[in-house]
Amino acid sequence: MPINSISVKLPGDVIDKEQLGIKGKKPLTGPGLSEDDGGIIQACKAGCLKLRTEGGCTLWIDNQQKRYVATKGDAVIGVVTSRQTDTFIVDIGTSSPASLSYLSFENATKKNRPDVKVGDIVYGKLLVANKHMEPEMVCIDSTGKAKGMGVIRTGGTLVYVSLQWARRLLSKECAFLSLLGDKLPYEVTVGLNGRVWVKGRSVEETVIIINLLKNSETIPDSMMSKYVNRALNKLVGVK
Amino acid sequence: MLIITVNLLVEKHMLSMDNIGLETSILKQADGSGKFTLGLTSVLASVDGPAQVGLQKEIIDRAFIEVHYESKSGQSSCSSRTMEYFVAQLCQQSIVTSMHPRTSILINITELHNDGCLSACAVNATTLSLLDAGIPLRYIVSAASCCISDEGTIYVNPSKETIKTSASYYAKAIINSCAVNELKYFGAYVKVAAVSCFPVDRVLHYRILLRHSM
């Protein structure tokens, strides 16, 4: 997928469409950019301007952030904070907690309620997310299948990372998760809200994976295999 | 028309521009944090938000902005209220508050050391922390302090001593990256601020470039 990083933009910088070679077609503006009535695109966050030319023009700013802002369709990990008559309230790190209907689980009916308790970790998708409404989460896709979503019950740990690192972990360019898996088998679920659930074969291995995960955020993609292998080899030496 | 000479090179009167220090993401718990150092003056700011807000503070069409300032002595006084008001006014203008309605953005400013230019440093530290937290901004606000001596010379970023001895005036000038012309104090001020704010923009630019070139 041709994604070009172009330049660093700060809030207030005007994006010059001609300089980017976008002619005629109106580009789609993503996060970090705002477009006024006159069609002038300005940056409103500090970060790297990215351009994708596949299937129309998409422009966005890739910035580093810790606070999650709900976006429709994002796969997120949340913690159930309370139960109401027909919904669960799930904390996903946004300003207002998400609601999760008890009917939006696989095979759930009015009589067959899902067994979800306060404190459970749920992985799901955001069905409704806009700034005026509280986000709504679902644990099924449009055909009613779970597709891996639902309550995570098998132990493990939930760690919080920055949003940029969570996005990078899920991208094809970043081989961190697969490199780690070659040496230490583990289970992982990454939410776009910066929450990562990890479970290794033992508690010790889970701790090792978490520490590596937290420390490798600043390692560039090209250095990742070297870094991970060296870190793991050191551990073998200690054992 | 008042003609004022701008003396940028009188070192004993001003805090050295070489000693500008910027740091971001230094606090782990906060959503964004920044430390701005100018000479010996140092200010730390942190931002939390957009976060959940109580019913009393909720505004339905925009975010609620709250600024807390803590002085080095820890005692709150009239001057710290003035500082909070000053920074809050600037943030109200620069933050796109309509993007996050019914939320709160809490800004905490902590004075680490004061050797003059405190309010300018507080503004710059706040800007750094807002950028770090990813709060949508219309423009970047940066600030510099000036004082005018008896002879009518303007000193940019004066030290505490210079402010004490300067008979006439001590003010802060605010500039932002896109609306320079909106500043209509007097010509010299805009120039002064532009000169002193330039390093802020440049260093920020450089830091983000470093982070993304990985």
Image (cartoon, coloured by chain):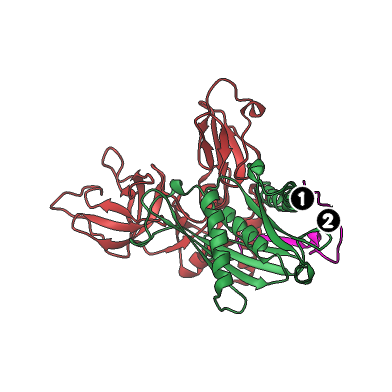
Chain colours: A red, B green
At which x and y percent is residue B98?
Answer: 44, 46
Q: Position of residue A231 (x, y in %)?
A: 63, 62
Give the quarter of the image for residue A82.
Answer: bottom left
Q: Residue A29's x, y, as percent?
A: 51, 34
The quarter holding residue A217 reads bottom right
- Mark 2 closeness class: few <14, some 14–19, many ≥20 residues within 10 Å: some
Specify whether residue B148 is painted magenta. no
Q: Mark 1: which secondary structure?
A: helix
> Is residue B4 on the magenta stretch?
yes
Q: Observer-nearest residue: B189 or A55?
A: B189
| Looking at the image, residue A128 lies above or below residue A206 | above
Could you tell me how far apart the alpha carbons at marks 2 and 1 are, in whole angstroms?
9 Å
Of the pair B13 and B132, the residue shown nearer to us: B13
User: Mark 1 sits on what residue?
Assistant: B195
| Residue furthest to the top | A24
Residue B8, disc: 2
Q: Is there a contact, CB below 8 Å, between mark 2 and mark 1? A: yes
Q: Which quadrant would the N terminus of chain A be assigned to in this image?
A: top right
Q: Secondary structure at mark 2?
A: loop
Rendered-image quadrant of the C terminus of chain A? bottom right
Residue depicted at x 29% and y 45% = A140
The label on residue B164 is none
**Mark 2: which amino acid?**
Leu
Q: Nearer the viewer, residue B95 or A185?
A: B95
